[in-house]
Amino acid sequence: MLEFRHVSFAYPNSESPAVIDISFELKCGERLCLTGSNGSGKSTLARLANGLYLPQDGSVWVDGEAMEDSAAAQRLRPRVGVVGQNPDVQIVSTTVFDEVAFGLQNLRLPAERIYQRVPEALATLGLGGFEGRDPNTLSGGEKQRLIIAAFLAMRPRYMVFDEPTSMLDSDGRGEVLAAMSELQEQGCGILHITHDPAEAALGDAVLHLEQGRAVGTPHSVSPKILAPERVPKPTSALQAQAFDHRTAPTVGQSAKNSPSQLGRLEADGVSFRYPQAEQAALEDVSFSLEAGEILLLTGKNGAGKSTLLALAAGLEEPSTGQVRLDAQSVQPGQVGLVFQHPELQLFAQTVERDILFGPHNLGLTGQSDAEIVEQALSQVGLDYQSYRERLPFTLSGGEARRVALAGVLAMRPRFLLLDEPTAGLDLRGQDFVFELLRNQARVGVGILLVSHDIDKFLALADRRLFLAAGHLSKKGPC
């Protein structure tokens, strides 16, 4: 079994431990689901499970052996695979085949077994025929399935899945959940971190964390913990002021930036092909987004949604066609983009410096640095004093997503593009994002958002676009 015995762990310079006195057992063939709000310690526990972190108190045991030091952790680590929230940080090879074969080569398997296991694992995750593809050309969901396939091929005794379906469409989610069930039937112990109550209900037991501590035991979790009450709408004076920030004059913004005159963002006949790609990611795509409108963009993984957001934000130049804001080229700061993996946007030494990077580069005035940061953090539901000095790389996935959004909002964009904005957020965090987007639209910000959680966003959106294989399609439900 995989066993935690009174495990505690704290990050350097942190005011409080991330994990406090955690104990549980995971036997081969069992599935334990781990739930909890953002910042409760779930991802930290995942890293402790295979020795990426070592406990400062207590111990982690794998099949009767303790990970008492780095040497023991290195020896036992192949028995515990960890699939993280962001597949980009786990990809190391230049082809899909080599990515899956990499771990097998390190395990010194003979070539004939490698050539047998790689296609089997890829087929299980719906990636058959991808062997020669460059992993960097895959969509976010395809990359996640590739990482899972690489671990499936290594056949560990225990697998830790840290929200593996958060970036996947419905088909991809079904494939991953089916693969997890197959692993469990084969005798693999599964530790599944999730915010989805339906996924948590698939477990043999559920362990809930709050502020680093376990709530009860894995067999005493109430329905209220699985589906906690929704957070009320943000109504503080600071948040209300933050939503209406465009009344303050700023450098680089003209009078037409008032909510009543914000205009239109549009793409006209846009096509785009990645270097050395066999086919275009987008072909002849046209759409418009009005000020104050919320537009939902949906489609399967690999349809081109993230590529379209990058073009609309001016991060990529179309191969053909053009993107315009009020018939002019998009200028820095006018269109804000929150990536599918927000940690890619965080690079400064503190949360405060990260949020101030954009406003300083744009020369925005009218507020002090402290006011900018406090207002931006308040908009995303984070406390200024608790987070301003935090190192961004110690944040949980949900906290990183909120901080990345705060950094974009601090630049006062006229249009806001969001790629899976609620992925990795607990139910309270999701509701907070919904209300934040509504309030941004009310003050004139045009919003284009990508999500696989169609049911959650249909009530929020004014219109919906369906993207299929790089083309806007009329076949998708409207």
Image (tube, rainbow, N blue to C red):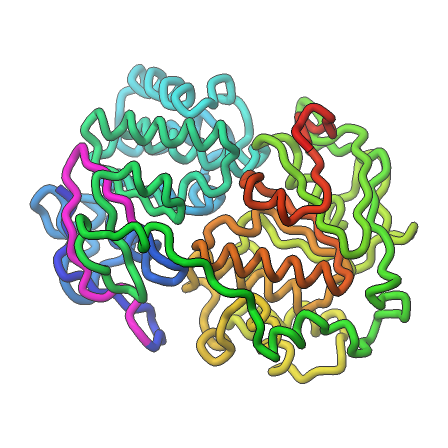
What is the magenta range? 16-34
Whole-percent x, y for residue 344 in the image: 55, 54
Whole-percent x, y for residue 433 in the image: 56, 58
Q: Dividing the picture into quarters, in which one does residue 475 lie?
A: top right
At 57% across and 46% down in the image, what residue appears?
420
Query: Is residue 166 among the parts visible in the rendering?
Result: yes
Query: Considering depth in this image, is 156 or 410 the residue closer to the camera?
Result: 410
Q: In the displayed structure, would residue 157 be above or below residue 394?
A: above
Query: Considering depth in this image, is 241 or 53 the residue closer to the camera?
Result: 241
At 21% across and 39% down in the image, what residue appears?
204
Q: In the displayed structure, would residue 126 be above or below residue 311?
A: above
Q: In the displayed structure, would residue 201 be above or below residue 248?
A: above
Whole-percent x, y for residue 454 in the image: 58, 39
Q: Dividing the picture into quarters, in which one does residue 370 lie?
A: bottom right
Q: Dividing the picture into quarters, in which one does residue 149 lie?
A: top left
Q: Is residue 92 left or right of residue 334?
A: left
Where the N terminus falls, by quadrant? top left
Query: Considering depth in this image, is 187 or 104 the residue closer to the camera?
Result: 187
Whole-percent x, y for residue 215 in the image: 23, 60
Q: Is residue 53 left or right of residue 444?
A: left
Q: Is residue 312 found inside the magenta-colored segment of the image?
A: no
Q: Is residue 31 found inside the magenta-colored segment of the image?
A: yes
- Count up the numbered dots: 0
At 48% across and 65% down in the image, what residue appears?
392
Where the C terminus falls, by quadrant? top right
Of helix, strand and loop, which mostly describes the magenta segment? strand
At 59% across and 69% down in the image, what residue appears?
379
